[in-house]
Image: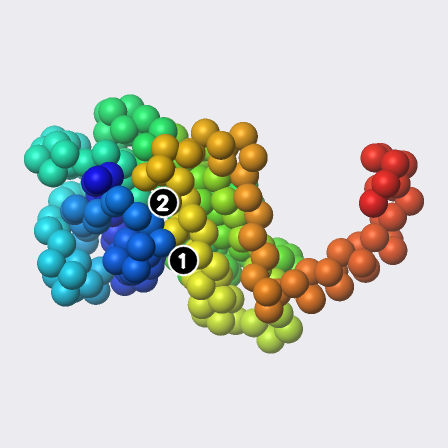
Amino acid sequence: MYRLAVLISGNGSNLQAVIDAVSDGTIPNAKVELVISSREGVYGLERAKKHGITSNVIDRHDSKKQFEALEDHKIDGIVLAGYLSLLPPDVIKKYNRRIINIHPALLPMFGGKGFYGIRVHQAALTAGVKFTGATAHLVELDYDTGDTLIRSVVPVLEGDTAEILQKRVLEAEHKILVHAVKALTENKIDELVKKPITLIREEDKESIIEFAQGFNKLYGALTEADNGEL
Ligand code: GRF
């Protein structure tokens, strides 16, 4: 049984996606053993309680307490699910290549310090991108770096506000996070690192193909010259 710790700072919908995937067997032979929140009173803590999962509120800088909790619960791997801080370097080193983060954009775009929550989506709208998405990746010592495991492409639609976009991206996050956590618990992370998966939701396919065709009209000759085929 693979013992997961999920770290949160807020609503915990990604935590819920992992809990649900464990309980419906999508992620077999695993258990959400521990939830650590960097903030008091957040809804993610209620979710943990509802599912009988031990939870602790631990200051984001307190690596000693984080270690104690992780070791007491014999944690095998860590999921950062809307955890809004960097983990202390010693924790990252100890759980090297066993920590996954979910980020609400296609990294390296709109990632790094200051890109969190609604700001990520505001930045995507301000930049005028046609597509954004979500990335599940391994955690390294800096924000939003580390090998990509799975990404999902999500279109930015006419009339989107940052809130509407956030909601669409969040649904994609839930899906790819579950995939990535499953790979973590089955020791298949290296396979994903070698060949990251890009998911496109059924309902997004049409607009992505339309965009690609328009792009191809503009840049087709260049693409053909580059690789000989399309
Ligand atoms: C998600 O967009 C996550 O990617 C980001 O913070 C948000 C948290 O959502 N880092 P939730 O707490 O999982 O609902």
Residue occupying image coordinates x 35% and y 37% = 186
Image: 168 above or below 134: below
Q: Nearer the viewer, mark 1 or mark 2?
A: 2
Which picture quadrant has residue 133? bottom right
Image: 1 above or below 104: above
Q: Quadrant of the N terminus?
A: top left
The 10 Å Cα crowd at callout 1, few under 14, some 14 to 19, many 20 or more, is many
Q: Which mark is residue 45?
A: none
Give whichever of 34, 159 is nearer the camera: 34
- Residue that mark 2 sits on: 181
Q: Which amino acid lies under the numbered mark 1 shown in the image of this protein?
A: His
Residue occupying image coordinates x 75% and y 64% = 210
The percent coordinates of residue 123 (x first, y second) are 53, 56
Task: Spot the residue most to the bottom.
Answer: 159
Image: 73 above or below 213: above
User: Mark 1 to mark 2: distance in Å?
Assistant: 11 Å
Q: Which amino acid lies under the numbered mark 2 shown in the image of this protein?
A: Val
Q: Quadrant of the C terminus?
A: top right
- Residue that mark 1 sits on: 174
